[in-house]
Image: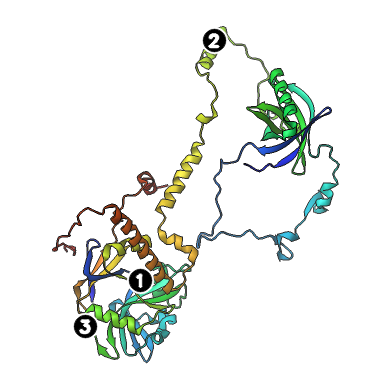
Amino acid sequence: MPRAMWRGAIQFGLVTVPVKLYLATEARGGLSFNLLHRECLERIQMKVHCPIHGEIPRSETVRGFEYSKGQYVVIDEADFEAVPLKTVRAIEIELFVDATREGHGANFVKQAYYLEPEPIGRKAFYLLKSVLADEGLSAICKIVLKDREALAALNPYSNTMLLSTLYWPDEVRSTAELDLPEEEFTFKPAERAMAQQLVQAMKGDFAADAYKDDYRQALLAVIEAKIAGQPAERAQVAEKPTKIADLMSVLEASVAAAREGRAKTADRTAGEPATAKPKQQRRRKVA
Amino acid sequence: MLSFDGDAPFDDPEWFFEPWWPGASALAWVEDFHARFQIEHLADPSAAFPELAAIGADFGDDQLIVEGTLLVLDSEGRPDAELLRRRLAEPGTTDGTPAFVASDLLYDLGQSLLALPFEERRARLAGVLSDTERCVVSRGLRGEGTTLAEAVASMGLAEISARRLAARYRPGVRDESWLRLPVVESPVTPTRPLLTLLQRLPI
């Protein structure tokens, strides 16, 4: 069971539906790596450094807002709590829009969340869902997440509803900056027919399962290969042998491991007659 | 005594196997509990390993000649050929931690042990040297050459040394009772052949 990342209620008109929010997606695209020192393969540390006092603990940092060049005002937790937000702990529905119409503003999605209604609000939750689905509507609402008020769209999805946080209109760039033609094109019926035919030929149901992140798969394969080819010696790095006696311990451990591996092989081949080696075997290389 | 190059690790109860430590083969003279080294071409690298001058005190007896390998360990305790080369080539270099791995005892209390079988010389060596952080008796296996080769391969080392337990020491010559064997890849089929193949490809 995943952990709910937000708890509150959907509010529209006089109806209140208590719900929990769960992240609907996880960022897996980038495999994460750690930065190591090339020499010793130790994790490097990110120290918090003050140009005046040198290294300082993270607890001594505060958040500052730069209101003019080099001038900061410190904003602490109390200040954040003092922000008057009506939408705290609520998904406040502002209006309903046609979910299929272009330009309803829900194109620019930041993050999708699943909703889970609390038992007491289940009936109202599914009533809202069924109305949205029947009418082909999307609910535009506001929600406060992580100290920020966000614009969001609420849509029926599978056996629940999906809340997609959106970019605010002032965060969406205009297409005016692009080099786009102003004229309208006219298409010959033959051209249109050909394009339609091509589109029809490639029409299908979108099954997300059919798509994989190929780059990630390939990168994982490379990583696994490196792990498989890693000399076992590397594994000893953690033990930090710096003395010659430790090197001998590593050897003893390796011998024990090799013996164990052999014992297993021997168990599997037990019952087979031991193959006697020819007495006179060539050991020296012929010069 | 010098070794012959062999083909592959083998199992034989009359032989003793130990890693071929990647360092400089050396003789250590211990006199008045002070150690002096001699490597190939009779060169004296003692100046390059000032830390090891005191290893004479690690031996229980005096008037010794010990055969072994000079190693320079990196910060993680692995023998580092480059650090060793630098130590030998550039006097005054003090990078890395030098160490001496002893594998044979030729003289003890001024008495020659050359006529004794290797097995006895080794037992005497283990008797006079107790491990310290810079000087140890090499570890190995009797009879189980292939097991040792596997272990050595897993440590990332490339060769093992095989010595006939009954052989006497013959100074200055190449002798059939001492073989230098390449560690051959473990005979166990890799569980993921495709990945093994992949890793050989240049990335």
The Cα–Cα distance between marks 3 and 2, rounded to whole angstroms, is 99 Å
- Secondary structure beneath label 2: helix
Judge by depth and name the residue closer to the eye, A79 or A91: A91
Image quarter hosting the C terminus of chain A: bottom left
- Secondary structure beneath label 1: loop
Which quarter of the figure has residue B115?
bottom left
Asked if the residue under mark 2 is in contact with the one under mark 3, i.e. CB atoms within 8 Å, the reply is: no
Judge by depth and name the residue closer to the eye, A70 or A72: A72
Which quarter of the figure has residue B44?
bottom left
User: Residue A11, position in %: x, y?
Assistant: 80, 31
Q: Which chain does the residue under circle 3 lie in?
A: B
**Count of marks placed on residues:** 3
The crowd level at tag 2 (other Cα within 10 Å; few <14, some 14-19, many 20+) is few
Which quarter of the figure has residue A140?
top right
Judge by depth and name the residue closer to the eye, B55 or A253: A253
The Cα–Cα distance between marks 1 and 2, rounded to whole angstroms, is 78 Å
Image quarter hosting the N terminus of chain A: top right
Same-chain check, marks 1 and 2: no
Relative to B89, is B128 above or below? below
Please indicate whether residue B54 sits to the left or right of residue B63 in the image. right
The mark found on residue A193 in the picture is 2
Q: Which chain does the residue under circle 2 lie in?
A: A
The crowd level at tag 1 (other Cα within 10 Å; few <14, some 14-19, many 20+) is many
Q: Earlier in the sequence, mark 3 or mark 1?
A: 1
- Would you name the residue on which mark 3 appears? B116
Identify the amino acid type marked 2: Ala
- Would you name the residue on which mark 1 appears? B23
Q: Residue at x 52, y 30 (%)?
A: A209
Identify the amino acid type marked 1: Gly
Q: Is residue B86 visible?
A: no
